[in-house]
Image (cartoon, rainbow, N blue to C red):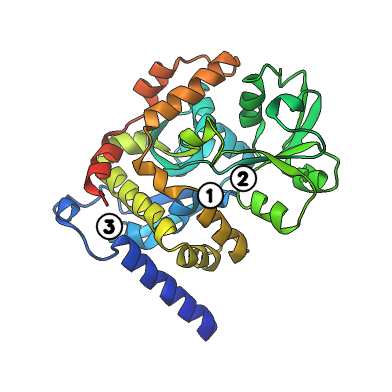
Amino acid sequence: MTMTQTRRQFLAMTALAGAAGLGRAPRAFAAEPPPETTTIRLSKFLAICFAPQYVCEELLRDEGFTDVRYGNISMQEQNDGSMLGRGLIDFGSNLTPGHILAIDAGAPITIVSPVHGGCYELFAHGNIRSIGDLRGKSVGGVAVKGLISLLTAWVGIDPEKDLTVVEDPAAKPLEQFVQGKLDAYLGFPPEPQELRARKVSGHVVVNSSVDRPWSQYFCCMLAGNREFVRKHPIATKRALRAILKAADFCVTDPVAAAQRMVDRGFTARYDYALQTLKEVPYNKWRQFDPEDTIRFYALRLRDAGMIKSPPNKLIAEAADWRFFNELKRELKV
C-alpha cells in the first residue's frame, strides 16, 4: 500500500467519523443492549447508488458488529431477492418495485427503511421524447425489466407485446445503446454518469430524481431477511442506524464517501462515484413517507398485472417501520 493510499484512507475514515458521529455514542443508543449477533452481511451489487450500505462499515463496528461482510449478488438474485430470502445476506438495497415483486412472488423479506430518492434515468435516441414514444422500440438496461414494464404499462404500452427489453449483461446492452442498436436505455449509477462522460448522442427522457411523479417517492429501499429482522431486533435497529448515518455522510462529505467506495473496491471510478453522490438525493429519507412509496409502486404493478397482492397487504405483512420511525426521531438534524 502506498503512502498516498494510506493517507486517503485515513482522511476518508476521519471524514466519516466527523460527519456521522463515529465513536460518539449518544445517550439514545449508548444504553441499548448489544446486538444479538456481531456478524452482519450486506449485499454488493453493480449499482453504486446503494452507497450508504457501502460506506457504513466503521459505523457498523461502532454499533457492535465485529464481523462485517459483503456478498456479491447477480442480476437474477437482485431481481428475485433469493439471496436475501434464503438468509445468505442479512440486508440489501433494491429498487422499491424490485422488493415488491420479490415479496409478491414469496420471498421472505421485510422492507425496513428507505435509502434514497430517484437514481435511475431513461436515455433515448432520435425523436423519443416521452415514455409513450417507446411503443415498438427496444430498451436496454441491467435488471430493468420490472421497472421498464411498470413505466410503460402506466402509459398504456404492453411491455410483452409492444416492447423489446434487453437486460442480459452478456448482451452488453449499454454498448448496444452507445452504438445505436437500442432505441433507449434505463440506467442506474454509474451508468448515467458514464453515458454523460462518453458524450453519447441522445437525451434524457426521465430523470427520477427531478421528474414527477417518480421524484416524489423513494427510488430504492432497504430490506432484511424476515427471520433475521424477527430474531434480531436490536441488531436490525443498530444496523439501520449505521446505514442512515452513512446516508447523511454521503450528503455532507461526498468527496470522502466517493473515495471510500473506491478504496474499498465498490467501484473503480472515483469521478462517477462523486457525481452519483452529488446527484442522488440521499437526504430524502427524512422527508418522504415510505408507506406512500410502497403504495404508489404496488398500485401500478398491480394495475399492470405484475403482482397479485394489494398494497395494504404488502405493507402489513412485509414492511416493518418500527426501527426507522424510532431512528427518524433520534437522528434529527
On the question of residue 137 being in view, the answer is: yes
Marks 1,2: beta carbons within 8 A = yes
In front here: 118 or 86?
118
On the question of residue 66 being in view, the answer is: no
In the displayed structure, 159 sits above or below 206; it is: above
User: Along the horizontal axis of the image, is 219 left or right of 13?
Assistant: right
State the residue lying farthest toward the bottom.
Answer: 3
Label 1, label 3: how far apart the Cα atoms are? 26 Å
For label 3, the residue is: 64
For label 1, the residue is: 49
Marks 2,3: beta carbons within 8 A = no
Circle 1: residue type: Cys
User: Along the horizontal axis of the image, is 190 left or right of 159?
Assistant: left
For label 2, the residue is: 188
Circle 3: residue type: Gly
In primary-sequence order, the first of circles 1 and 3 is 1
